[in-house]
Image (spheres, helix red, strand yellow):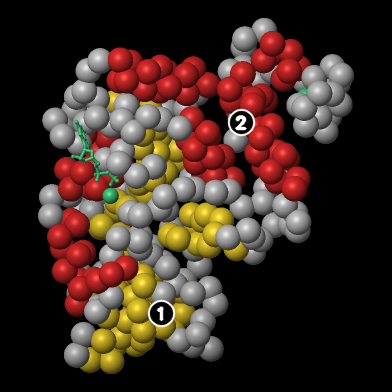
Amino acid sequence: MADLGRRDWARVVVDHGRNLLIETPTGARLQAQTRRITPAPVTGDRVHFEDLGGGQARIDAVLPRRTTFRRLEGRLHNRVVAANVDQLLIVFAPQPAPEPELLDRYLIAAHVLGLEPLLLLNKADLSGEHPAAAQRVLAGYAAIGYPGLRISARSGLGLSELRDHMQGMASLLVGQSGVGKSALTNALIPGALNRVGELSTALGTGRHTTTTTRWHGLADGGALLDAPGVRDFKLWPLSPQELIGGFPEFGRAEPCRFVDCQHQREPGCAVLAARDAGDIPAQRHAHYLRLLTQMQRTPAWQRPG
Ligand SMILES: Nc1nc2c(ncn2[C@@H]2O[C@H](COP(=O)(O)OP(=O)(O)O)[C@@H](O)[C@H]2O)c(=O)[nH]1
Ligand SMILES: [Mg+2]
Ligand SMILES: [Zn+2]
């Protein structure tokens, strides 16, 4: 039997479908084509490759993934956009105004996919009314138990603390457009975007550079991944139990009368009682109900592969 462990492996740092850029443990970067293999390699994957010379390589296999990050595309297509991510850095800002429901969807995804969530309130250098509202959003999540940091890509506030949180981890930046993900990538890794931009141009697929996820390796073995161009983030079909797991404050309410309670309008529901008492944020429960209804309307309510 072939000893796969002794063949060359590399990290996928940019993927454009079947055209990829891979980086070997010694830092060499190669343009790679992939065979028709399953799963198709994505950014963050560790792959086995054959060096074809002249900076070209062919990917033969994808090593087992520790984790994946996905999103729903279209109605049912569950697309893996990055592999081997440890932590989700969920960025929001005073401007554009926070979308708590989007933040909730990212937090649910982190729970279901086994990623550590860290909320980042960027642009904390700004002052005034909008920043106060954003600060309340961060405080609300802190009360539920979600960790968060106030940072500024512009002034550098909080970035050393953020670096501590990133130590040795592969961290994926997510969040709505305009919150400062690119600015943050450049603040944490000066020149990172230019470097990858040049490499992507070399791939001859420059037009994709704004939509693909990129892996920026860090000296301590960790990495920062940014996924520019994602306008929205939709969850794939989840079971009620998976959804509920994304609301840890529900689990802290007293047990409900029915063990399989979905906290909609069941009698003896402790979650509804806690919401009415103000112990569970009404907005979080409303988001939960909306997502539950959406999931139940999905034609094939099944776990996508
Ligand atoms: N005041 C302030 N502006 C910022 C900060 N970070 C980013 N911005 C600005 O916000 C806008 C969007 O930033 P960008 O990095 O492109 O956001 P992205 O769409 O999430 O990648 C730009 O005009 C940035 O200069 C920050 O920490 N403070
Ligand atoms: Mg950007
Ligand atoms: Zn209940």
Tell me which corner region of the image, top left, top right, bottom left or bottom right, holds residue 96: top left
Check disc 2 and report its element: helix, strand or loop. helix
Q: Residue 180: x and y, percent?
A: 26, 40
**Inter-mark Cα distance, 1 to 2:** 37 Å
In percent of the image, x 21 and y 44: which residue is there?
A: 183
Q: Residues within 10 Å of mark 2 (few under 14, many from 20)?
A: some
Q: Nearer the viewer, residue 175 or 218?
A: 175
Q: Nearer the viewer, residue 185 or 129?
A: 129
Q: Residue furthest top?
A: 277
In percent of the image, x 77 and y 27: which residue is there?
A: 264
Q: Residue 51: x and y, percent?
A: 29, 88
Q: In the picture provided, is 263 more to the left or to the right than 12? A: right
Q: Is residue 11 visible in this depiction of the protein?
A: no
Tell me which corner region of the image, top left, top right, bottom left or bottom right, holds residue 305: bottom right
Q: Residues within 10 Å of mark 1 (few under 14, many from 20)?
A: some
Dot label at residue 18: 1
- In the image, the residue with mark 1 has its CB under 8 Å from the nearest atom of ligand 2: no
In percent of the image, x 20 and y 73: which residue is there?
A: 201
Q: Nearer the viewer, residue 6 or 181?
A: 181
Q: In the picture provided, is 69 more to the left or to the right than 235? A: left
Dot label at residue 287: 2
Mark 1 belongs to which amino acid?
A: Arg
Tell me which corner region of the image, top left, top right, bottom left or bottom right, holds residue 74: bottom right
Q: Is residue 63 visible in this depiction of the protein?
A: yes
Mark 2 belongs to which amino acid?
A: His
Q: In the picture provided, is 230 more to the left or to the right than 215? A: right
Q: Residue 93: x and y, percent?
A: 32, 31
